[in-house]
Image: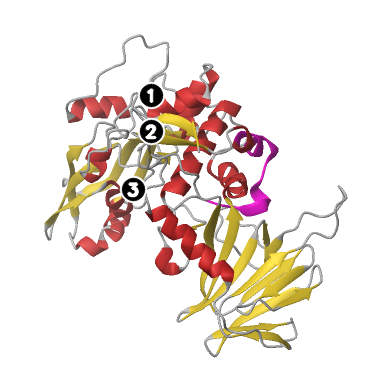
């Protein structure tokens, strides 16, 4: 059966939702925010395999629909600018000249009826490595020049059920989970259309937010999402860019230090515990930072009960030859010295000089620095160099603090605040200065 080519109503609705977001609806005028998202799960695929846990309907541009039984595997391949649908024996079931949509249908109204889900068969990009992941919502299969793109169209709140448990451990205190839910919701709605050129709003990786679908839902994180339903963070009436990272290590970073752009609500915030009556000032020289980065202090983000202490303070030993391999693209030759040139208020280095036998280079920006030195947890580090009798470096010891870019909420720091009895909204306004938490 061939499915016709008229532009589907759901495509028009999706474009309309994106267009609406481009209008000033970020909360300033109190308009309702979009209730669904387009999440890219796969791109550039020669084949996609899907399977419904309940019967599914396949619909193309004409609105004509085909129904397939639960558990039947459907194989999608590019064909003549459109999408061919086959069974597992490669027998054709349908062909659509354009995008197709697969919608699950519940088998009944009783409590024992299976949850309507669609499994994406094969490996996924999620860090837990689980294959054959099931998802809520609708799947859209889009033919593109580089292959097929798979998009999960899902309710914002259901999307968050699969995000919060991927971004924060469900074991964490409930108020910390609720803070994460609001931050993740705000981030998603702020960034609708970020990847529109690829046919979706956000993807399911750490480039946007890690989204694990139904596999990753947990009762505690789902409760956190539900108890903060539709709550977002605003600054002067507009959605904020609610960045967050795992462990700040003592101070969060400011947007100005990280990017050169001053963002009023992304300032450097202390993460010291309540038992430190006067928070220490930021160190003002390299000797001070070296002492700070090598010392375990009573910080909110030191939570051995909940999180890995080895990401709070860490040391990484890198033999010179391994370091030179990481720096190969910079062509410095034999590495002689590493000198921090500029730090943000969190201690994260934003410019570092590497002296080599061939040439000396300056590496800028936090992520570039982390990658250049082999993928460090953060750029908040100091370096000790162990040399041989001739003065040639043998091993570089990177003493560091924290994990991630340090902007916005410190996720493990939020745990420490929740343990002290802080409510989720107070946690959020601590990390995002001058913001309000409101329902939209």
Whole-percent x, y for residue 416 in the image: 49, 23
Whichever of callouts 1 and 3 sits on the residue coming sooner in the sequence is 1
| Residue 15 disc label | none
Whole-percent x, y for residue 323 in the image: 29, 54
Q: CA distance from mark 1 to mark 2?
A: 8 Å
Query: What residue is shown with label 3?
Result: 318
Answer with the quarter of the image where residue 257 lies.
top left
Q: At x 36% / y 37%, what residue is drawn?
A: 406
Span shown in magenta: 210-224
Q: Is 70 placed above or below 114 here?
A: below
Q: Is 199 placed above or below 309 here?
A: below
**Image position of 290 (left or right of 252):** left
Could you classify mark 1 by the number of other residues whose Cα lies within 10 Å: few (under 14), some (14-19), or many (20 or more)?
Answer: many
**Image position of 352 (left or right of 187):** left
Q: Is 277 placed above or below 363 here?
A: above
Whichever of callouts 3 and 2 sits on the residue coming sooner in the sequence is 2
């Amino acid at each position: 059966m061939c499915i016709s080519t008229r532009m589907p109503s759901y495509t028009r609705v999706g474009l309309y939702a994106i267009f609406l977001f481009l209008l000033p609806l970020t909360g300033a005028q109190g308009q309702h925010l979009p209730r669904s998202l387009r999440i890219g799960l796969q791109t550039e695929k020669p084949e996609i395999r899907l399977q419904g846990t309940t019967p599914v309907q396949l619909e193309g541009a004409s609105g004509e629909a085909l129904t397939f039984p639960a558990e039947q595997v459907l194989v999608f391949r590019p064909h003549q600018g459109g999408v061919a649908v086959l069974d597992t024996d490669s027998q054709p079931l349908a062909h659509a000249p354009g995008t197709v949509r697969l919608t699950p249908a519940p088998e009944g109204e009783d409590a024992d009826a299976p949850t309507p889900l669609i499994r994406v068969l094969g490996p996924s990009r999620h860090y837990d490595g689980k294959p054959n992941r099931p998802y809520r919502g609708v799947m859209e299969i889009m033919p593109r020049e580089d292959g097929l793109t798979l998009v999960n169209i899902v309710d914002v709140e259901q999307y968050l059920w699969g995000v919060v448990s991927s971004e924060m451990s469900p074991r964490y205190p409930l108020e910390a989970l609720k803070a994460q839910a609001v931050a993740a919701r705000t981030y998603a709605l702020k960034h609708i259309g970020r990847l529109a050129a690829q046919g979706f709003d956000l993807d399911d990786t750490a480039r946007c937010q890690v989204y694990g679908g139904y596999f990753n839902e947990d009762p505690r994180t789902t409760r956190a999402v539900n108890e903060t339903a539709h709550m977002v963070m605003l600054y002067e009436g507009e959605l904020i860019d609610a960045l967050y990272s795992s462990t700040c290590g003592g101070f969060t970073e400011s947007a100005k230090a990280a990017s050169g752009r001053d963002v009023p609500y992304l300032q450097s915030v202390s993460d010291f515990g309540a038992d430190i009556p006067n928070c220490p000032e930021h160190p003002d020289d390299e000797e001070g930072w070296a002492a700070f980065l090598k010392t375990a202090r009573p910080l909110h983000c030191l939570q051995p009960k909940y999180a890995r202490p080895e990401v709070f303070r860490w040391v990484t030993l890198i033999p010179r030859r391994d370091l030179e391999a990481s720096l190969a693209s910079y062509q410095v030759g034999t590495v002689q010295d590493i000198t921090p040139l500029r730090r943000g208020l969190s201690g994260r280095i934003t410019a570092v000089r590497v002296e080599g036998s061939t040439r000396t280079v300056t590496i800028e920006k936090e992520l570039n620095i982390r990658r250049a030195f082999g993928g460090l947890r953060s750029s908040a580090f100091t370096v000790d160099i162990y040399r041989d009798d001739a003065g040639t470096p043998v091993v570089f010891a990177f003493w560091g603090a924290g994990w991630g870019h340090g902007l916005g909420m410190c996720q493990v720091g939020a745990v420490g605040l929740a343990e002290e009895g802080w409510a989720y909204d107070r946690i959020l306004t601590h990390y995002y200065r001058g913001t309000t938490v409101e329902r939209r």
